[in-house]
Amino acid sequence: MIDVNQQINAVRRRVGTREFKAGEARVVTVSQVYESTVEDVWDACTNPERIPRWFLPVSGELRLGGRYQLEGQAGGVVERCDPPVGFAATWEFGGDVSWIEVRITAEGEERARFELDHIAHVDDQRWTEYGPGAVGIGWDSALIALTIHLSTGASVDPKEGMAWMGTEEGKRFVTLSGEAWYEAAVADGDEPGAARAAADRTIAAYTGAGADAGADTGTEGATEKGE
């Protein structure tokens, strides 16, 4: 499906906190540079006819104040829209509300960086149990599909993506992603032993050796985002 090592190394991952709405929130950030224009990346992320070609079918109104719904996944409200450089929306799933913020910036001629923050008020118990990988691995898997779509123009069937995540190569991708999120957590100041245990639980959940981490943490389901 994709060169696993190359894709893992192409993504920047960051973990942090910030004051947001009701108080201090956890922030998980992914970003990747594409051989594409800012306008093309923006279109891939906001055009309702194009989003299903790499993510999921979407319904609703993709405009400021509009409500959207991803098929079988999160829905929410568009809270900010700044074409073609960014948008923000609520991410409502499983009874919980978190937020996403997307930024698209030029990185030289015909190159653009996609960056996404997933912001959530996560209690310490949930964070200790699964850490940033609970959502981070899901976004990593989504970036696989975006990479394929932007580099080839091809559509990615979500069912094929989910099937690939269950292969040995897919599980290797999940493991490497989980390790990268472990490193990001430690870099942010998490105690290494606790971060290691959380990463191991999350990797096991995504690879089928345990309960679904995304469902447990009230965020996107682990395999549901495997594009």
Image (cartoon, helix red, strand yellow):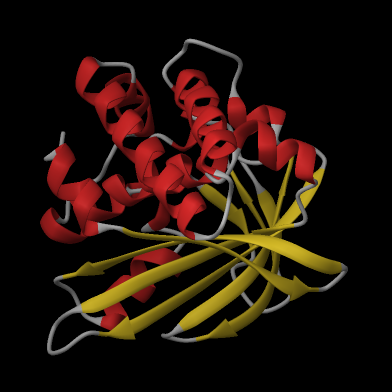
User: Does residue 38 lie above or below 123 as drawn?
Assistant: below
Q: Position of residue 55 (x, y in %)?
A: 41, 47
Residue placed farthest to the right in the image? 22
Query: Where's the C terminus, which quadrant?
Result: top left
Q: Position of residue 174 (x, y in %)?
A: 35, 31
The answer to whether residue 56 of the structure is visible from this angle is no
Going by the image, does 69 lie left or right of 181? Answer: right
Residue at the image point whose x is 20% and y is 53% from the top:
9
Residue at the image point whose x is 36% and y is 38% from the top:
179
Residue at the image point whose x is 59% and y is 41% from the top:
131
Residue placed farthest to the top in the image? 209
- Quarter occupied by residue 213: top right
- Quarter occupied by residue 124: top right
Q: Position of residue 204 (x, y in %)?
A: 47, 18
The residue closer to the viewer here, 107 or 164, is 107
- Quarter occupied by residue 126: top right
